[in-house]
Every structure is written in structure tokens, then in C-alpha cells.
């Protein structure tokens, strides 16, 4: 089904925001909605890629895109990624994403977020929003004043709070599965793990790894982040930069900073046998230019980022049932079996883990999913 919604009527006629041109049919999105609110200046795009497995869930990115075309390209790409991520995590969720065009520091206001919340509400639950780059838990609480179709709220508002808690648990769980696959031992005991980026996820991951008996080496461009992890865990070793970390004699490399961590030079220099970290979009070539294949050739086991970092979406998904930390944690522990399944499939079929993960997600959508779009029951 391919359908581009007309912009919803706002209190005043929309003028500044152009209607979308035809989008890349290869993405096959179900619905793309342009949202304009002249009163608040809101300009947003909500993309629903698929609802075959359930409501399309994905965060709202608030970002100063140079052009509308850039914003559209990003939301189409990100929403498709959520379809795969949610399917692979075994959730009853389709994939969606939204972007708000603007500078969050300058343009974010209660009025604008509430106008956005009303657009989310207008989709009747086909799209459920959450935090992403430029949006935070308090923003979800504001959006919640207009719609129930928002997760990633604070505990005071029935949410689960900071999703980095179970994201870090999920990365550690997936890393234990990698250790089982490579070394036949479901633990990082006695291994050295290098973490690039010790922000919210990386810092908590360091704690889980130390408790598991690993040695931890970290690096971060932000001195305060390094100081915070040293305060919490004085036993971690610090190296000056990511380049040094990658060349160090580490067993596992955990990229937990920005995207594009695995480029050609990094993969050639990497000493680790396993790559498993939270950062999104780690393959600098998007999996198309052979970086995944090169890792296979070098005997490096790469655990696909969108599988490994799905603890956060599993955490916020649980809010739909009324958040229960134990239940959510139990679901996150399912990433152990999911990671093993991906790595075994890749090995059996002689394909990259990234491709194997994609096949497993598509199989779940084809077998478990509905062939009709999700329409909420009232
Ligand atoms: P964060 O902003 O709290 O931490 C990122 C850290 O990386 C910061 O301390 C930053 O200084 C550091 N950094 C930036 N550039 C660096 C570089 N070149 N070298 C070394 N360090 C660098 O973010 P986070 O919430 O910890 O998320 C980390 C990654 O995981 C991001 O890619 C994010 O998209 C992804 N992720 C996070 C979650 C979540 O729940 N927080 C869920 C899924 C994916």
C-alpha cells in the first residue's frame, strides 16, 4: 500500500511547507504525513513504513535539516530501519519515525510540541512516538498531554524514563552471545573490551562488563564523560582517542558514540575479534560497500547495531502495557538468543550478520505479520 496523506488542516492555511514529491518507491512506505502548524511554526514529517506487525513505533528526531528534501530522505530511511529493528527484536510493532524540522535549542516550545502531539493523535495509534536525537523524556511528557500514543515518558507520567538503562543491558546481553559464539563462553570474563563513547549507554555498559569480570578500556572526546566513568569505576583504563583504542589489544570493540564508526581504515586496523556496541548506523557504507564482507574476511564477528541496541525500544514498548522493569528486562534478555540466531544464520549461509539479521526480520514480517495495514480498534 502506498499512500501519501494530505497535510492535515490546521487552524490557518499552510503556505510555507511544500507538498512532498514522489518518494523513493524502493522504500515502499505505507503512509507519509506532512504536518504544518502556522501558529507554532511546527514543520514535521511522520513516516509510517510498515504496520504489518503492529503500530509503527519510532522516535521523533528534532533536527535543523538544511532542506525539506533532506528531512524527507532521513525520515524515510529511519522509519524503514525501525521496521527491521522492531521485527528483529520480536516486538508486535511496525516501523515508523518522525522528524521535526528546526533547531531544538531555539525552536522547541510547549506549544510546538503540543501541536505535534495533536498530529500524532490524529493518526489514531497507527504511529507511536518516542525520543530520538534532539528530543528527551520531558518532551514526551508534554506530547503526552495531547496524545496517548507516545512512550519514553517519565516514571511520574507512567513511562519508563531514560531508555539507556535497558539499552546498556541489551548490548551486554548481545555481547555475551557473541562471546558464546566465538569463544564458547557466555561471559566476558577475562576478555578486554574497548568502549568508544562513555555517555549514557557506554558508562552503564562499562559497569555491566566489570561486574561480568571483563577488563574495560574507554575513550571519549568529552573529558567530563571520561571523568564520570572514572569516578564510577576507577579500574577502567583510559586511552586518548578512538584510533588508539581500535589498535589496542582488545578482544571486543564496542562503538557507543556516533554513527559511521566502522569505516575501511578502522576495520583494517581493528585488533578485536568481536564488534558489538550501541551506536546507530555503525557501517560507514550502510552495508552496501563491502565493509561487512571485509569484517567476515578478517574473521571479525560483527553483531548488527540495530539488533544489539534494541534494548531501548524494548524498554519503551513495555510502556504500552504499563511499564514493568522486570518484564522489560526479561524481554531484553531475549537478545541473547536473537544474536546467536543471527550469527549462526550468517555462518551457515556464508553471508554477513547484517544481511542475516535483515532476512530474519523479513521472515518474521512475512510469517507473523498481517498483510493489511494496522487500523486501531476503538
Ligand atoms: P550520549 O550522547 O549520552 O553519549 C555519546 C558519547 O559519545 C558522549 O559522551 C560523546 O562525548 C561521545 N563521543 C562523541 N563523539 C565521539 C568520538 N568521536 N569519539 C569518542 N567519543 C565520542 O549518547 P547515548 O545515549 O549514550 O548513545 C550512544 C549511541 O547509542 C548513539 O549512537 C545512540 O544513537 C545509540 N543508541 C542509544 C540508545 C539509548 O537508549 N540511549 C538506544 C539505541 C541506540
Image (cartoon, helix red, strand yellow):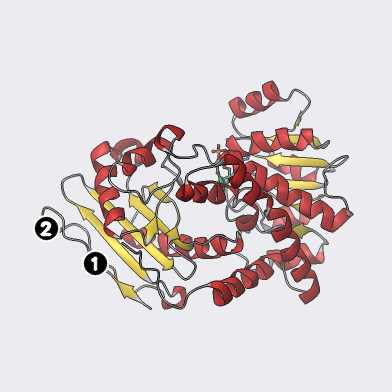
Q: Do the residues bearing badges 2 and 1 touch, measured as CB atoms within 8 Å? A: no
Residue 41, numbered label: none
Along the horizontal axis of the image, is 210 left or right of 106? right
- Residue 20 image point, x, y percent: 28, 68
Residue 13, numbered label: 2
Residue 288 in view of the camera = no
Residue occupied by mark 1? 19
Most extreme residue toward the left, as rendered? 12
CA gap between label 2 and label 1 equals: 13 Å
Q: Quadrant of the C terminus?
A: bottom left
Residue 298 in view of the camera = yes
- Residue 346 image point, x, y percent: 75, 69
Say what secondary structure mark 2 lies in: loop
The residue positioned 35% from the left and 40% from the top of the image is 104
Q: Is residue 255 shown above or below 305? A: above
Q: Please name whichever residue, 307 or 141, is drawn nearer the observer in this view of the structure.
A: 141
Q: Is residue 242 shown above or below 33? A: above
Q: In the rendered structure, which disc, 2 or 1, sits on the residue that comes first in sequence?
A: 2
Q: Is residue 267 shown above or below 278? A: below
Q: Residues within 10 Å of mark 2 (few under 14, many from 20)?
A: few
- Respond yes or no on whether mark 1 lies under 8 Å from ligand 1: no
Q: Residues within 10 Å of mark 1 (few under 14, many from 20)?
A: some
Amino acid at each position: 500500500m502506498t499512500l501519501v496523506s494530505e497535510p492535515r488542516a490546521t487552524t490557518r492555511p499552510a503556505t510555507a511547507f511544500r507538498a512532498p514529491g514522489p518518494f523513493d518507491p524502493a522504500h515502499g512506505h505505507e503512509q507519509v504525513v506532512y504536518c504544518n502548524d502556522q501558529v507554532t511554526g511546527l514543520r514535521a514529517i511522520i513516516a509510517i513504513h510498515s504496520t504489518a506487525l503492529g503500530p509503527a513505533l519510532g522516535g521523533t528526531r528534532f533536527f535543523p535539516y538544511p532542506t525539506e528534501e533532506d528531512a524527507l530522505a532521513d525520515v524515510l530511511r529511519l522509519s524503514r530501519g525501525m521496521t527491521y529493528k522492531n521485527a528483529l527484536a520480536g516486538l508486535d510493532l511496525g516501523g515508523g519515525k518522525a522528524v521535526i524540522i528546526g533547531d531544538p535549542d531555539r525552536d522547541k516550545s510547549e506549544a510546538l510540541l503540543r501541536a505535534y502531539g495533536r498530529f500524532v493523535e490524529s493518526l489514531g495509534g497507527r504511529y507511536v512516538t518516542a525520543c530520538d536525537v534532539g528530543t528527551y523524556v520531558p518532551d514526551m511528557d508534554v506530547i503526552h498531554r495531547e496524545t496517548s500514543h507516545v512512550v519514553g515518558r517519565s516514571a511520574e507520567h507512567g513511562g519508563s524514563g531514560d531508555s539507556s538503562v535497558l539499552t546498556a543491558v541489551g548490548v551486554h546481553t548481545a555481547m555475551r552471545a557473541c562471546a558464546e559464539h566465538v569463544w564458547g563462553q557466555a561471559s566476558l570474563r577475562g576478555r578486554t573490551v574497548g568502549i568508544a563513547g562513555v555517555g549514557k549507554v557506554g558508562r552503564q555498559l562499562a559497569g555491566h562488563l566489570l561486574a561480568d569480570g571483563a577488563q574495560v578500556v574507554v575513550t571519549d572526546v568529552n573529558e567530563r564523560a571520561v571523568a564520570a566513568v572514572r569516578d564510577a569505576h576507577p579500574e577502567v583504563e583510559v586511552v586518548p582517542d578512538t584510533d588508539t583504542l581500535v589498535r589496542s589489544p582488545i578482544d571486543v570493540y564496542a562503538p557507543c558514540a556516533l554513527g559511521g564508526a566502522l569505516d575501511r581504515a578502522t576495520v583494517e586496523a581493528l585488533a578485536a575479534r568481536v564488534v558489538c556496541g550501541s551506536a546507530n548506523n555503525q557501517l560507514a557504507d550502510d552495508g552496501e560497500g563491502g565493509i561487512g564482507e571485509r569484517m567476515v574476511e578478517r574473521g571479525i564477528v560483527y553483531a548488527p547495531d540495530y539488533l544489539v541496541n534494541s534494548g531501548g525500544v524494548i524498554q519503551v514498548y513495555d510502556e504500552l502495557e504499563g511499564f514493568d522493569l522486570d518484564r522489560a528486562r526479561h524481554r531484553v534478555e531475549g537478545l541473547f538468543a536473537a544474536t546467536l540466531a543471527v550469527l549462526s544464520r550468517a555462518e551457515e549461509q556464508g553471508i554477513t550478520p547484517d544481511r542475516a539479521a535483515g532476512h530474519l526480520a523479513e521472515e518474521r514480517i512475512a510469517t507473523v505479520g498481517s498483510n493489511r495495514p494496522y487500523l486501531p480498534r476503538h
